[in-house]
Image: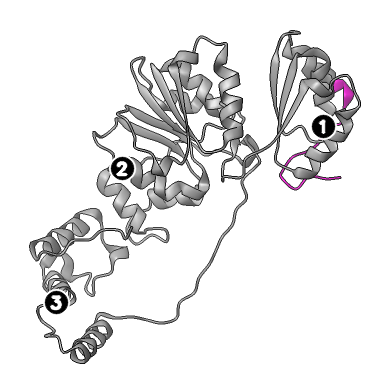
Amino acid sequence: MTKSHGQHLLNNQSVIDSIITKSEIRPSDTIIEIGPGTGNLTMRLLEKAAKVIAYEVDPRMVVALNKRVRDTPYAKKLQIIQAKSHGQHLLNNQSVIDSIITKSEIRPSDTIIEIGPGTGNLTMRLLEKAAKVIAYEVDPRMVVALNKRVRDTPYAKKLQIIQGDFLKAELPRFDLCVANCPYNISSGIVFKLLAHTPIPRHFVLMFQKEFSMRLAAKPDGKLYSRISVNTQLLAKVQHLITVQKSCFTPPPTNRKIRSIFNQKVTKKAIKAKHLKLCESLKVKPHDDPVSVALEVIDKLESTPTLSKKAPLRAKKLDLTEIQKMLNAFMEKGISFKDDE
């Protein structure tokens, strides 16, 4: 049986013995194991500890491990949790966590929001540094595991766990957000944090590489997009570190979706279609928002700073030019917002 989640099964007994020795396990310990596989290390942990909580993403491995332990004296000491299915990859590399903590510049008085804490590897370090951590977790299994992990520690009173969807939550006042973000709600996280008032000091957020590159993309770049503009209008974006796939459980996969559009839509074509629509609706084509918007664009294209970029293309405009365009639209009573 082989895994398809980037896990390599440890089968060397002397290496396992060395891990057990260096772990300095006490008989009263509760141990979290991430990616137990078929249980070669797990069985030795069970010999030494009071309890082992094993997080496994592969259902085949869950079945195999359950079978292996079922008729042993250790069956009651093992809790197997099939790992998250909410787009979260559990960060398990201590040096990466140390780097995140350093770059977050946490103050002892800070209240920190963490999104998707998982089993709490980053959370525990945040609790060491901050006055309070508010962790939003959608997976009830992870909520249970994190509560157990922090229960008998000095940090128990500093941690507030909120089970539910972060995007639907009403956020309290906080100083910074530090998180290994679930990939499937990355855009929503960015927009929610940027819209929060009062404005927090900063955010240290981990995203998949392509998404983070989009946040920091520059005009006329391949990845320059709406989210690049909206983010950079409200915040200074800085790339801090690159994290390898092997630092997560399960390791993230790269999925690229490529769309090809051959149709070329020009301002001239938009005007022609709009005039035709106005005619069919018996509406004057000069007083409606589309006509006003096209008039604004015509005027902007004649200004010295933008005339060289006519016809205007959003992909080529920097933040100053986009702000100028937005101001011109607002002077004409035209504003933009996302559809709910």
Give the labeled residue for mark 2. Answer: 194
Q: Is residue 56 left or right of residue 112?
A: right
Q: Distance between the residues labelled 1 and 3?
A: 68 Å
Give the labeled residue for mark 1. Answer: 10
Label number found at residue 288: 3
Q: How far apart are marks 3 and 2 (CA)?
A: 32 Å
Give the residues in magenta.
1-15
The picture places residue 66, in percent across and down from the top left corner, at 83, 34
Residue 51 in view: yes
Position of the C terminus, as image quadrant, is bottom left
Where is 292 relative to 90, above or below?
below
2 or 1: tag closer to the N-terminus: 1
The picture places residue 11, in percent across and down from the top left corner, at 87, 31
Residue 281 in magenta?
Answer: no
3 or 2: tag closer to the N-terminus: 2
Q: Which residue: 47% across, 28% down?
A: 100
Position of the N terminus, as image quadrant, is top right
